[in-house]
């Protein structure tokens, strides 16, 4: 599952540079699929496409946030989610709205970084 930043966030910013997928943004900041990834575009469920550099609306205006579609819990990079490891107030927790298996997280990592996903 993805990680979420709770409203206990003190906006220290310690988590942002730790994310290998650039999935963490300051509150109110627009984000893109392509930032920190190899995505040039993404195809939405309705078949339409978004450019990898097209700005997206912030997930939160008040505190740092994680884009769930870019979060892989650091699978394939680190043993544990780095945002949670460095958070001084323990507000980076599992997001119950985004349940994903380890294989799904590794496939997402491969998709984000244009790797050949080999899932057994």
Image (cartoon, grey):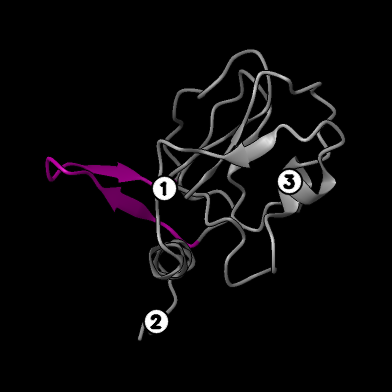
Residue range of the region highlighted in magenta in the rendering: 38-52
Q: Nearer the viewer, residue 49 or 91?
A: 91
Where residue 27 sits: x, y (%)?
Answer: 65, 21
What label does residue 116 carry, if any? 2
Image quadrant of residue 4? top right
Using residue 27 as the reference point, say whether residue 10 is left or right of it: right
Image quadrant of residue 111? bottom left
Residue 82, compared with residue 24, is above or below; it is: below
Q: CA distance from mark 3 to mark 2?
A: 28 Å
Residue furthest toward the left? Answer: 46
Disc on the earlier residue, 1 or 2: 1
Q: CA distance from mark 1 to mark 3?
A: 27 Å
Give the residue at mark 1. Answer: 52
Using residue 24 as the reference point, say whether residue 10 is left or right of it: right
Disc on the earlier residue, 1 or 3: 1
Q: Nearer the viewer, residue 117 or 87?
A: 87
Where residue 67 sits: x, y (%)?
Answer: 51, 38
Q: CA distance from mark 1 to mark 2?
A: 19 Å
Element type at mark 1: loop
Give the residue at mark 3. Answer: 84
Q: Quadrant of the C terminus?
A: bottom left
Q: Residues within 10 Å of mark 3 (few under 14, many from 20)?
A: many
Q: Residue at x 51, y 38 (%)?
A: 95
Q: Residues within 10 Å of mark 1 (few under 14, many from 20)?
A: some
Q: Nearer the viewer, residue 79 or 39?
A: 79
Disc on the earlier residue, 3 or 2: 3
Q: Is residue 8 magenta?
A: no
Q: Residue at x 53, y 50 (%)?
A: 71
Q: Residues within 10 Å of mark 2 (few under 14, many from 20)?
A: few
Element type at mark 3: helix
């Amino acid at each position: 599952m993805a990680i979420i930043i709770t409203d206990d966030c003190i906006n220290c910013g310690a988590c942002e540079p730790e994310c290998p997928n650039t999935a963490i943004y300051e509150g109110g900041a627009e984000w893109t699929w392509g930032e920190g990834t190899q995505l040039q575009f993404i195809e939405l469920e309705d078949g339409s496409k978004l450019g990898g550099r097209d700005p997206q609306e912030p997930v939160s205006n008040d505190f740092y946030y994680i884009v769930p579609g870019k979060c892989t819990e650091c699978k394939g990079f680190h043993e544990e989610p780095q945002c949670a490891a460095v958070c001084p107030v323990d507000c980076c927790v599992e997001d119950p709205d985004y349940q994903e298996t380890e294989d799904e997280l590794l496939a997402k990592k491969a998709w984000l970084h244009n790797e050949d996903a080999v899932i057994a």
